Amino acid sequence: MIHQTEITLRPRPRGFHLVTEEVVRQLPQLPKTGLVNLFIKHTSCGLALNENYDPDVRQDMETIFDRLVPEGRSEYVHTLEGRDDMPAHAKSVLSGVSLTIPITNGRLALGTWQGIYLCEYRDAGGPRRLVVTIIGE
């Protein structure tokens, strides 16, 4: 069985946001076993799996990414869409734009402390669309 649908995440400001519950609420019924692939249809944000308990981790991740790819560098050529745009594209490449998560007993098989992050790299990225592909039996 293969099923594909699209879901939308509400707009968020720049930062690393835990969106596991928002994603799960919008998923169709999952098969007993299989895989879910989440693919974000944007070039200035990303998806990641990481710590779902302590919000300090999300703040630290933002600090790390901002140091790796700072805004306002004179070397950037793509600057028409604002100071945060080119860095957002580079950060998207670093974090990636898709996740594949196993399905076990009809649920996402996330670890105890794992959560799905929307990595929003723009100051105001707007709603974000995800293609969800479910493969299972």
Image (spheres, rainbow, N blue to C red):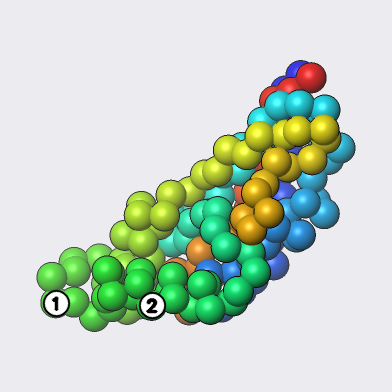
Residue 85 as seen in the image, left or right of residue 26? left
| Residue receiving disc 2 | 63
Q: Which residue is mark 1?
A: 74
Q: Residue at x 38, y 77 (%)?
A: 63
Nearer the observer: mark 2 or 1; the answer is 2
Q: Amino acid at mark 1?
A: Ser
**Upstream in the sequence, badge 2 or badge 1?**
2
**Callout 1 secondary element:** loop
Q: Nearer the viewer, residue 78 or 105?
A: 105
**Does residue 68 appear to the left or right of 22 in the view shown?**
left
Q: Give the class, few, some or many, for how many residues have Cα within 10 Å of label 2's Cα (few <14, many ≥20).
A: few
Residue 7 visible in the picture: yes
On the image, the x and y values in percent for residue 28 come to: 83, 40
Quarter occupied by the N terminus = top right
> Where residue 40 sits: x, y (%)?
55, 49
Placement of 96 over or under 2, stated as above or below? below
- Quarter of the C terminus within the rendering: top right
Q: Tag 2's secondary structure?
A: helix
